[in-house]
Amino acid sequence: MNTTCAYCGVGCGIRLSREGDGWQLQGDEQHPANAGALCVKGASLLESLDFPDRLLYPRWLGQRIGWEQALDTLAERFTAILAESGPQAIGIYLSGQLTTEDYYVANKLMKGYLGSANVDTNSRLCMSSAVAAHQRAFGEDLVPACYEDLELADLVVITGANTAWTHPVLFRRLQQARARRPELRLVVLDPRRTMTAEQGDLHLALRPGSDVALWNGLCRYLLDHDGWDKDYVARHVSGFEALAAALDDPAWQLEAVAQRCDLAPGDLLGFYRLFASTPKTVTLFCQGINQSNQGVDKANAIINAHLLCGRIGKPGAAPFSMTGQPNAMGGREVGGLATQLAAHMGFGEAERDRVQRFWQSPTMVDGPGHKAVELFEAVHRGEIRALWVLGTNPAVSLPDGNRVREALARCELLVVSEVTANTDTARLAHLLLPAAAWGEKSGTVTNSERTISRQRAFLPLPGEAKPDWWALTRLARRLGFGEGFAYEHEHEIFCEHAALSGFENEGQRQFDISGLARLSRAEFEALVPLSWPVNARWPQGRARLFEDGRFATPDGRARLLPLAQLFPPEPVAAPEAVRPPAGLSLLLNSGRLRDQWHTMTRTGHVPRLQEAEPWPRVRLGAASLLALGLKEGDLVRLYNGLGEARLLVGLDEGLREGEAFQPMHWTDRQCSQGAVNRLIAAVVDPLSGQPMFKQGRVWADPQPTRWQGLWLGWRDWDEPLDWWARRPLPEGNCTLLASWSEAPEALWQRLATQGRWLRLPLASGWLAVALAGDRIDGLLLVGERRPDIKVELLASLLGTPLQAGALSQTLNAALLGESRLICSCLRVSEQRIVDAIVRQGVSELAGLQALLGCGSNCGTCLPEIDKLLIKHVFIASA
Ligand SMILES: Nc1nc2c(c(=O)[nH]1)N[C@H]1C(S)=C(S)[C@@H](COP(=O)(O)OP(=O)(O)OC[C@H]3O[C@@H](n4cnc5c(=O)[nH]c(N)nc54)[C@H](O)[C@@H]3O)O[C@H]1N2
Ligand SMILES: Nc1nc2c(c(=O)[nH]1)N[C@H]1C(S)=C(S)[C@@H](COP(=O)(O)OP(=O)(O)OC[C@H]3O[C@@H](n4cnc5c(=O)[nH]c(N)nc54)[C@H](O)[C@@H]3O)O[C@H]1N2
Ligand code: SF4
Ligand SMILES: [Mo]
């Protein structure tokens, strides 16, 4: 059976085959996105399905209830709120991780039946700047390119994206193309020297937020050096005069731009020349562009340069916005954003009328609703009284996390549809509804290149879990809308969605999949991946848009836009910019790690995905560490007027000085104080409403500790403590502990009174053994500093009878230190690679791959392996 990966917007195809009682998973060779390849997250999907806190039944205030009762309660409360406060008092918050069918039903119910446009999605945090930029430039939210364009290009510019980690299979495709054709150049524009930047031919570490200046400077350079396509602009583009006039300003001359971007003029010139002389250029962008207080402008600045050179709608030439989530694109098609009506239509009178006639619905919203950040503000004010959250964890993922948590806690009726019961958001819900997870649910998703693929169910629904569209449909029926929501299968929903896209569409809307509106159930089941549009003109779909130079604007021309660079890139009046008295000032960047997915609800319980980066760390540059007097592994306190976090520090030589990078993944479930968004102000782009997650102002102080410790046990650590962070082990879990308020002796006194603890002195502190009968139930190491230890080895003692010899032998071996995992796919540690180089004399990559397998699957670790080779072969022998 074939399905689609649950994670990123590459949208890889997956093939499942039966093996004994279980399933075996591999990449689908036939899928156009990945041709059989998978990254470590996709390859671990089966392991991830073993959720620790799976939500199996509806729960009302923590108590199990039946679906009938849950839906009746929901219908009753919605009806009462509608009667008392009107439709604006109801909100729905959706997710790019739902299927298109889930999205379609939610959107129809809200906009056409309840009459509220307060339906937004976490795509607001992710894609809304790109959506708005596409609409401004092309007249519609259209991604022009396909993945193959990356392989056909002669220059790929990756900006504001760490593609090697976040879209690994696509990056691998690019790298393979570069190996075949060394003339294919890669330039990376990112303030941070990421794993992606490491692999570029050129990396420009621009000043955060200065992207508009960089692209304006490029356009100015193209105009000055005859590097633009006059013919293309004359025939297919509008707005040239205004752009040229705006660029006729000394601010956009090379030297001035270089200064704004904090780059060496020579480096910048090198990039401009390369761009000017390479017709086949693809510029790929993601959250470093979108998540900004001028995200829409940044995206349009990139598109400007491509339009000016006519580099769009051609093989190997396009601006390319990568979508993050598996179905962010499907949500955009449906109209799941509060600023869209449905099927790429807005709120004009004719469009509202058209959609209402198609739906035959009792009502129709009259304009856009609240965007995500405003939506939660309206909840905070009590204006939205009932909020239904499906498939997202806003307590963690929205900016100004403390305020969002406050809003959720104040909400009169919070309904959360979830797969796991124990998320920071789900814990605040009144009503919890169990959702079908990946592997159990069925429907369609659309990836970054507009390819619609099927997600198929291969597992039975556990407990009383139901697909989200089912829950929405059943509520709609209870509210008296049976006719509009008679669906019994996702196939019916998909066909209706496809029909709406083609309804009274004489080519005005390029999003048109009416060619799929009449699929039979069997054809829907057998649907193969297809890129939209799919209609009478393009029955087999279409890989590239705008090939004819016609855009979706009224005059058919794409629009160039004059754009100003905001400076400084941070908003001066950001609420957190109230300067606390002391502390080192840092600009906080946030984003993703290779092996984790968002708020860790799907990856945090998979030991193999934890190994490369097990603990919540904020990375700082060497000078910042020095200024703070901290070493790697110490604790730091980050704070501002909004909140605080306490994390381990790590050194990242790829950061610009004065900047820090904190992963977005840690939540209150895994760490006492590790969630980054408590520190990020709710500053948004004025057009898209997308939050500026990438530049927050924080202050840092060292966080001294009286002791640090490590707990290994089958049960969770449950003594109250100042600080902790937890990760799972194949069996049991491992918790880092620290205290600044209590001496280690005081901790021991607390434990000793429980009676089942034994203590042994160590050179650097002590080891306490928790006993259950005569067996080891847990191990606690306490010292001045966190012990550097082979966790897995020590954990092998859990459950064994207490024997002094075995204990000291294992302990000694474990204390020889932990080795970092380099290749997550084949689980090869740094130590094994170094041993192979130093002891076995392997001196090149192919040899390491043959011996250990490292780097031979997804390839994201190749640059790290390279570094080890350089360090241990070349430098050592020099
Ligand atoms: N492993 C993994 N992969 C994922 C996800 C995940 O959770 N884990 N999530 C998926 C989702 S939903 C998304 S949206 C994507 C996101 O994919 P990406 O956008 O590739 O990932 P991020 O880590 O958010 O950061 C992007 C980069 O922007 C840079 N940046 C910051 N500020 C600026 C700036 O001012 N200008 C420029 N040019 N760059 C800047 C950051 O340094 C960072 O390297 O990843 C998807 N893939
Ligand atoms: N600081 C900072 N914050 C960020 C970002 C950043 O770069 N920096 N990135 C932003 C971006 S781009 C994104 S996309 C968001 C992501 O943020 P979220 O959407 O909040 O993150 P997830 O952890 O993916 O949450 C999805 C939840 O849905 C559940 N789930 C999975 N499948 C289903 C299903 O089929 N049905 C239902 N009902 N539930 C399901 C999962 O268990 C999980 O709890 O974070 C944003 N926040
Ligand atoms: S690249 Fe993205 S879609 Fe492909 S396997 Fe990895 S996470 Fe899944
Ligand atoms: Mo995202």
Image (spheres, rainbow, N blue to C red):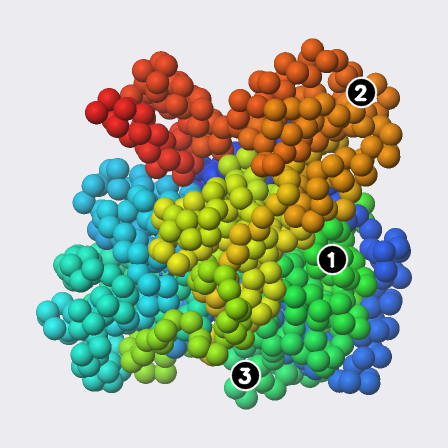
Q: Residue furthest bottom?
A: 349
**Front of the two marks 3 and 1:** 1
Viewer-side residue, 26 vs 184: 184
Q: Is residue 373 above or below residue 168?
A: below
Mark 1 or mark 2: whose residue is earlier in sequence: 1
Q: Is residue 247 visible?
A: yes
Label 1 CB-ligand 2 distance < 8 A: yes
- For the C terminus, the quadrant is top left
Horizontal side, residue 502 vs residue 761: left or right: left
Question: Foreground: 792 or 164?
Answer: 792
Disc 3 to disc 2, C-alpha distance: 67 Å
**Viewer-proximal residue, 210 or 745?**
745
Name the residue that disc number 3 marks: 347
The residue that label 2 is drawn on is 775
The amino acid on which the numbered mark 2 sits, given as a three-letter code, is Arg
Q: Secondary structure at mark 1?
A: helix
Mark 2 element type: strand
The local crowd at label 2, few if under 14, some if 14 to 19, many if 20 or more residues have their Cα within 10 Å, is some
Please give the name of the residue rendered at 68% of the width and 28% of the height, measured from the top-left corner.
766
Task: Judge the density around disc 3: few (<14), some (14-19), many (≥20) Cα neighbours within 10 Å.
Answer: some
The circle on residue 426 is 1
Check disc 1: other Cα within 10 Å, few if <14, some if 14-19, many if 20+: many
* Residue drawn at point x = 63 percent, y = 39 percent: 708
Instruction: Kindly identify the amino acid type of the residue bearing the numbered disc 1.
Output: Ala
Q: Is residue 354 left or right of residue 865?
A: right
Residue 360 visible in the current orientation: no
Residue pictured at 55% horizontal, 35% vertical:
611
Dot placed on the residue nearer the N-terminal end, 3 or 1: 3
